[in-house]
Amino acid sequence: MRAKWIFSIFLFLMSTSLFWCETQKSPERQSLEIELSFTKSSHLYFILDIGERKIDLKAKGLLLRTWKIEKIRLWGDPVLQNPISLVKKSALFPPKREEINPEETEKDEEFELEALELSDMPSSYAIILERNISIYIRPKSKGLTSLLKNIGHTLRWYFYPSLRTVWSKAKRKSYTAFDVLMENKEDCRSFYWTLAENSQFIILPP
């Protein structure tokens, strides 16, 4: 009698385990399903692949551009495999156009709108996503000034996210931060330039 009970419990656990394995989706399968949903629209989207250390820009499943990541650090809660929208870009010196007041312009005076170029984009900035996710972008150190900036950023990295984590936990919210180091300033600037309002991100775990 006891042997029958043990065998029944064993079969129940095995069936539960098999059901769990079938219903659980791997991160790769989840990301693939999300990408397939994006192929139905013409919107651009980004894939931050932590394991491969790269950021891909895609449209309808086609790869348009890849940014190589030299180094990446993570802090906080894991990110779910869902598309995440860009909330805003934050930079100490954001690109600005010269303001022209038509009332102050003389009748016969001609003026031209200033076009922003890649060199006008910041090389160090933060990307704020939904669900309290921050991605800090900066170039690899080249020269004394850049080295001092990166040292200051590293010190701030070990101080600021810890405070944000405590504050977020007090409010019962998650908090995640990524510190991304790119090869050069041009990569950082071109990535900033491609970020449009409400851009979609897929973050793949390591």
Image: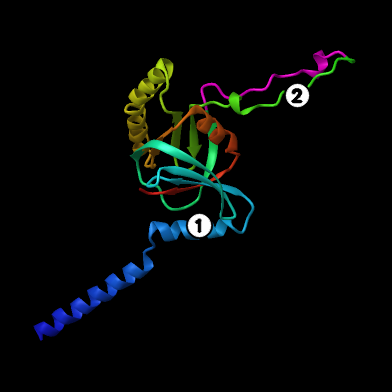
Query: Tag on residue 34?
Result: 1
Q: In this view, does 107 lie to the left or right of 124?
A: right
Q: Which of the 4 image quarters holds residue 21?
A: bottom left
The reply to whether residue 61 is visible in this rendering is yes
- Specify the amino acid type for callout 1: Ile
Residue 104 is covered by the magenta coloring = yes
At which x and y percent is residue 71?
A: 37, 36
Measuring 37% from the left and 37% from the top, which residue is drawn there?
A: 72
Quadrant location of the N terminus in the rendered image: bottom left
At which x and y percent is residue 204?
A: 42, 49
Q: How is the image coloured?
A: rainbow
Q: Residue furthest bottom?
A: 1
Q: In this view, does 31 lie to the left or right of 75?
A: right
At which x and y percent is residue 16?
A: 28, 72
Q: Look at mark 2 in the image and give the residue it sits on.
A: 113
Label total for image: 2
Query: What secondary structure is the magenta-colored segment mainly?
Result: loop
Measuring 80% from the left and 19% from the top, which residue is drawn there?
A: 111
Measuring 57% from the left and 43% from the top, which residue is drawn there?
A: 199
Q: Nearer the viewer, residue 149 or 198?
A: 149
- Specify the amino acid type for callout 2: Leu
Q: Nearer the viewer, residue 9 or 134?
A: 134
Residue 62 is covered by the magenta coloring = no
The reply to whether residue 133 is visible in this rendering is no
* CA–CA distance in space, label 1 to label 2: 40 Å
User: What secondary structure is marked by label 2?
Assistant: loop
- Span highlighted in magenta in the image: 91-106
